[in-house]
Image: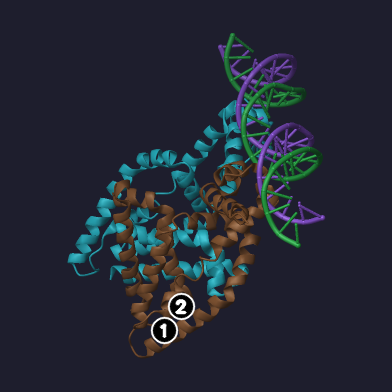
Chain colours: A cyan, B brown, C green, D purple
Amino acid sequence: MDKSEKDTEQRILEAAIKEFSLKGFDGARTASIAAEAGVTHAMLHYYFRTKEKLFECVFKDKMQYVLDMVLVPIVRAEGSIKERICKGIEAHFDFLMANKDLPLFVFTTLHSRPEMFREAVNGLAPVFREQLKEVQCECDKAHEAGEIGRVDVPMLLCDIACLNVFPFLASPMMMVVAGYPQERYGEFMEMRKRETVETILKRIQ
Amino acid sequence: MDKSEKDTEQRILEAAIKEFSLKGFDGARTASIAAEAGVTHAMLHYYFRTKEKLFECVFKDKMQYVLDMVLVPIVRAEGSIKERICKGIEAHFDFLMANKDLPLFVFTTLHSRPEMFREAVNGLAPVFREQLKEVQCECDKAHEAGEIGRVDVPMLLCDIACLNVFPFLASPMMMVVAGYPQERYGEFMEMRKRETVETILKRIQ
DNA sequence: ATTATCTATAGATCTATAGATAATGC
DNA sequence: ATTATCTATAGATCTATAGATAATGC
């Protein structure tokens, strides 16, 4: 039972994740994926039948990370709701920093294959809704206690998503706007992270 | 001098704008563009030589709208700096509402063809920098007058871009998060617009 | 026997061009 | 004469599969 058996499928999947993330569905080549995985082209079709089905696997793998990254730290972390919202923003930003090509991939797919996206999201939505309700409840309590203003959590999450995710799509453009040379990418993104926390804190005041 | 002469090139370009915006470079087909433009496929190559060159024309056409949409109303409109910032946000949002597929197109290109983007932006940057300086100056004055807090205009523009543009990439996902059915798209986006103005106002307080 | 892998190639699709023909402007 | 258009097709590229062969597990 050589490990290469089970590995082949996984290696193809990993190569596919890389290729599809970088080039999108249309730009990706099954032959390149096979080459990257170190198998013959026929193997790709043996395991996944079609490019389409392989893409679906990749997309599902990616989507599992998308929805809950902000909420989980807010729900689970320690401290006041305000502190946990900051933690949630930072955790989400750090996650994106480690998965820089995720956003573009998700949004191109969301645009080019809406059905696939719908299906994936419907699977994830119930858990998400539950967490959201919990956070809304806590925000309401904090509001009554005078800690923060009235907060509509879904809208707040949208704000956070905007501020956190967008720089990963637009950083080269933003850096031109802000007059940063492209080499100082890390520095710029660190500033954006702080700016987002600040903006959201003022928003919920 | 039948009008169809000059028109052919224009018709191809318009068809190309549509096709490339919707499907990206890799997904677009020169044959489809020609069909949409109502000319034979050979004509496309006659006028634009290659798919690549045609794409470049499309990209340049799109880019001219990208940079200055927020700043122009801020610089030109009447009223206090605070009022004009609101106007700028709203004008930018309305512009995007009328050009819904622009953001995804720009960011996929920014990713897949960074050189092309760099070139286009360098052309637009000088004017932009000038306007930016002007607005920074006004914000500083308003700050000294106690109307607003200290504002870093480039960072503020990044915030506005995040909040304004991102919903046009992510609205289907956001609407699921916010519990909106997809049919109420217009209503949802109207809410986002108000939310963004509100968030930015609090940010600069 | 079943599962995994390879070689070779069919068949579809797409960009680009060659070469002929029609329209236009001088 | 030059410019615009068409037909036809070359040539490249890409997905998918057929069919043979090797490896594995019972």
Mark 1 or 2 closer to N-term? 1
Whether the residues at callouts 1 and 2 have beta carbons within 8 Å, the answer is yes
| Residue B73 in view, yes or no | yes
**Quadrant of the image for the C terminus of chain B?**
bottom left
| Residue B113 in view, yes or no | no
Where residue A180 appears, as percent x and y from the top left, is 57, 73
Going by the image, does B15 lie left or right of B48?
A: left
Q: Amino acid at mark 1?
A: Cys
Residue topped by disc 1: B139
Front-most of residues A178 and B81: B81
At 70% across and 51% down in the image, what residue appears?
B49
In the image, farthest residue toward the left = A144
Pointer 2 chain:
B
Element type where label 1 sits in the image: helix
Q: Give the CA separation, mark 1 to mark 2.
A: 8 Å
Residue topped by disc 2: B153
Above or below for A106 versus C26: above
